[in-house]
Image: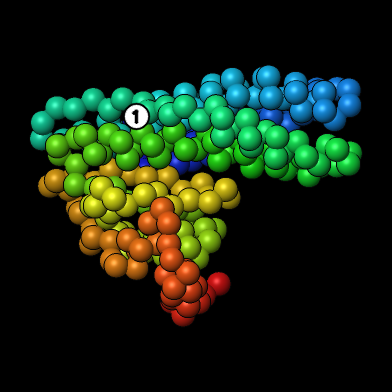
Amino acid sequence: MVTAQESKQLLALLGDDAEDQVRWMLRRSSGQWESRRLQLLDTLPDVVGFYSEGSAALAADFYDDARVGVAGSYAAAPVLLDRTVKIRRGVAWASEPLSVDDDELAAARFAKLMRSEMARPYRDTILTNQKQDPAAVGWKRITRGSASCTFCRMLAARGAVYRKDTATFAAHDDCMCTAAPVFKGSAVGPEANTVQYMASKRRRTPKEKAFLRDYLAGNFPD
């Protein structure tokens, strides 16, 4: 049975392979920078799709493993949302440094784009299935421990369980956090507090943003 951390490590390995692939694709592109961008626009979305399928399948397998021993039957299904338009926008952004022959910056941007996009289906699969599973009570955040930023560590503090359907998985481009389902009858941690739910909102007011900055500085110093 795969644990949450072991599944996260497998996702990281998949991300390493995805990053190597996109860097190779960038090196293989040729011609003027506009031509190179078009080549990547034509090919990269399908490559992202390939790794996204692997990410979603990995999450579904982990969900089923985590559910062993839980009452009732449920089989997790991979969740893959159509992000073609946003991926193409990401490719256009990542390609910009090619216009000034900065392949190094372009490679860093493409790697960032690839890791962000291929990790998303993992989280979508966990969150969508736990909403549909009658035995699930919520989800919790799995971070990289001390390697994670203060924001991620705050969201995962106390082993907080996010029970409200309105809570989104707040993430940034460098975030490789994953989610794990929490089931009835298991060792359920405390529910996410008001600050954690606030930080998980899709949109926050300037006042809320200022409060969170002060809260992080006072409670989660680097």
Residue 151 in picture, x, y percent from top left: 48, 63
Residue ID for mark 1 = 60
- Which residue is at 43% across, 29% downward? 81
SS assignment at label 1: helix
Q: Tell me if residue 212 can be seen.
A: no
Position of residue 202 measured from the top left corner of the image (x, y, whole percent)? 41, 53
Q: Report whether 2 appears left or right of 35.
A: left
Is residue 4 or residue 83 the one in the foreground? Answer: 83
Q: Dividing the image into 4 quarters, which one contains the C terminus?
A: bottom right
The residue type indicated by label 1 comes to: Ala
Q: Is 76 in front, or is 204?
A: 204
Q: Is residue 50 positioned above or below 185 on the image?
A: above
Which residue lies at the image location 30% right of the left edge and 36% below the top edge? Answer: 128
Q: Residues within 10 Å of mark 1 (few under 14, many from 20)?
A: many
Question: Which residue is at a point 70% across and 34% down the rendered structure image?
Answer: 92
Quarter-wise, where is residue 85 in the image?
top right
Question: What residue is shown at x 44% (from left), y 33% (from top)?
Answer: 121
Q: Which residue lies furthest to the bottom in this view?
A: 218
Drawn side of residue 23 relative to residue 9, left or right: right
**For residue 193, above or below residue 4:** below
* Count of marks placed on residues: 1
